Image (cartoon, coloured by chain):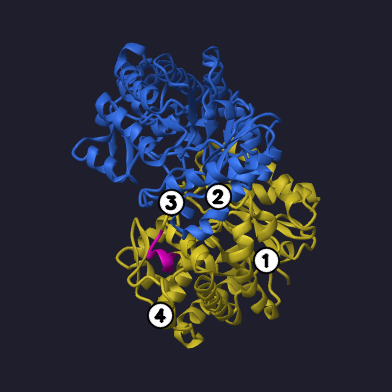
Chain colours: A yellow, B blue
Amino acid sequence: MQNTLVSAARSESVSRTPVWFMRQAGRSLPEYRELRAGTSMLESCRTPDLVSEITLQPVRRHGVDAAIFFSDIVVPLEAAGVAVEIVPGTGPVIEHPVRTRADLERLEDLTPDAISDIAESIGRVRAELDAKHPDTALIGFAGAPFTVASYLIEGGPSRNHEKTKAMMLGDPELFSAILEKLGRMSATFIDVQLTAGAQAFQLFDSWAGYLSAADYRRFVLPHSAAVFSSLSHHDVPSFHFGVQTGELLPDMATVGTDVIGVDFRVDLADASRRVPQGLALQGNLDPAMLFAPWDVLRPRVEEIVRAGLAHDGGHVFNLGHGVLPDTDPAVPGLIVEEVHRISSEILGS
Amino acid sequence: MQNTLVSAARSESVSRTPVWFMRQAGRSLPEYRELRAGTSMLESCRTPDLVSEITLQPVRRHGVDAAIFFSDIVVPLEAAGVAVEIVPGTGPVIEHPVRTRADLERLEDLTPDAISDIAESIGRVRAELDAKHPDTALIGFAGAPFTVASYLIEGGPSRNHEKTKAMMLGDPELFSAILEKLGRMSATFIDVQLTAGAQAFQLFDSWAGYLSAADYRRFVLPHSAAVFSSLSHHDVPSFHFGVQTGELLPDMATVGTDVIGVDFRVDLADASRRVPQGLALQGNLDPAMLFAPWDVLRPRVEEIVRAGLAHDGGHVFNLGHGVLPDTDPAVPGLIVEEVHRISSEILGS
């Protein structure tokens, strides 16, 4: 039986709008905080017991239509031998940033052997989903080349990406070589997940929204497109998302993805007009709205369900950015029920 | 003689494109860091000797067409008796956040008497500009009601504004009453600056870009419009800007401002099509581009000058966000010269 999420992503007819939440597995869940206590983020991401349990927690609690594989954008880097630490409250910190051709040459390719634990984690999640939640899809995950490059070049999270942009403009050949290598790394990371049983994947370009459309097209889009292209033989639906990407939406939609995630700032009906016909949309409830009372949140959910159904390429309900850590863990489940109820009613199923 | 910046802002013909930089007065200048050493941000903002000197530093160094009054968004709050501290590396922290009707009632209005030092600072800047830089305009400054409200409601800087948005949706009457009071405060703060000699003003809505266009129109726009309306008798050009406001541009352009600042993500030619005819544009070089080599930065500057001159409502060259702290202090001056050179050449003057 084909999963509802997979059908919607393929722009096929569905009986209800599928729904999941970016960062649904994470700090907003007390059971996650309990499980993670005393274990670092990167160690958690490499421990199949923890990864599978954390990935499944929101499936059990919220009844979402998809599990998103619990990992981090820098996991492939670490697996390839890069000295990286995720510092709580800061983010990933890279011990030796990559800023020269010599730095790049020291960066090893990622081999599937180095992430056999990832395959094992995926297998465990799929086994439980198949047994207990057969209509819930497992979405694989990796960071897009530009976003991973920004961490590598800056040496950590950056609000302004000045070193990355300076290299992009000042040494476009080196910049391109870095993104090419990181694109291969992301593709390998996703390939292992798909081979082990993930039924879809999302490529996150967290920082693309810090580029103008012209720069995105010239310096970034070809490298993201290469990732999608190299995974096309898997014949699974692909998702692409970046925050603050209203201006980039028409370009990001041409990267070779089946579903394009829409930032919460963009009106979904506008997004529908900005993307090529037949592409599915994902999104785009503002995660901060989950802090509003249910009687004002509910109509917002309905509005997005209706706008999504009005789009002729399919719609996957999601937030327009990740679940915020202080979110009441009871709220996502209410949204799932409401999305299912309204969409089933409209679709007459 | 009418200043070039004032002419451009009024969509009148000019002999060259005027240029200034948001946050031109600040941490990127060694003379600023020296002057500020040992003095807190809020104390600096209330000391006319320091304010006038800091405001004038970039005029002397970069040869910009405008000085932007050195202050901070929370200065009016502090002057009205709110316990607020600007914590280095964090931002403004409010001791008692405003979250209830009773909290709001305790918030005093700002009286001009409470900011006589601001009038004095403006007077000093104008005296030196008149004497030494008669073609350099002085732009006054205040935060827009939504941005100030977010600090007050959250209790400090917030990446997601969840408390602010929850109140906006959950208690729109209280939210509106807070923005109304803060709008009066911003208007008083600017009024004092204009009365003391500022020749234009910019209302900064730093956080507006975190709202959808529909929410911006309904909950925020009327309060920003009230600020512009209450200052219209001054007959000086007004500027409005917020970062990440591509989606909001058509709405922000109707707030009653003469010039609309464009975020660096938005193509200036697109911006020209999104705003009502006759409105001047300001912007929009990516501040991170100032870290690129001059031979790639220079054509970017030229591109923006040309796009600005192609817009029929006037153009003020600026960044599409503030100067970054690590910017080489020699670069803004090079940009000023280049903007003047190219625009003069094109305009045949």
Identify the mark at residue A37; answer none if there is no mark.
none
Chain for disc number 4? A
Report which residue position mark 2 lands on: B301
- First in sequence: mark 3 or mark 4? 4
A81 or A287, nearer to the observer: A81
Marks 3 and 4 sit apart, C-alpha to C-alpha, by 39 Å
Which contiguous range is marked in magenta? A151-157
B217 or B190, nearer to the observer: B190
Is B252 included in the stretch rendered in magenta?
Answer: no
Amino acid at the residue labelled 1: Val
Q: Please, what secondary structure does the residue beneath circle 1 have? A: loop
Mark 2: give few (<14), some (14-19) or many (20+) Cα within 10 Å. Answer: many
Amino acid at the residue labelled 4: Ala
- Position of B209 with respect to A80 (left or right) is right
Amino acid at the residue labelled 3: Pro
Residue shown at 57% from the left, 22% from the top:
B225
Q: Please, what secondary structure does the residue beneath circle 4 have? A: helix
Report which residue position mark 3 lands on: A325
Amino acid at the residue labelled 2: Val
Please tell me in which quadrant of the rendered image residue B125 appears: top left
Q: Is label 3 in contact with label 4 (beta carbons under 8 Å)?
A: no
Marks 3 and 2 sit apart, C-alpha to C-alpha, by 41 Å
Chain for disc number 1? A
Q: Specify whether disc 3 shares its chain with disc 1.
A: yes
Residue B27 higher or lower than A47, as above or below: above
Q: Kindly tell me whether residue A316 is visible in this rendering.
A: no
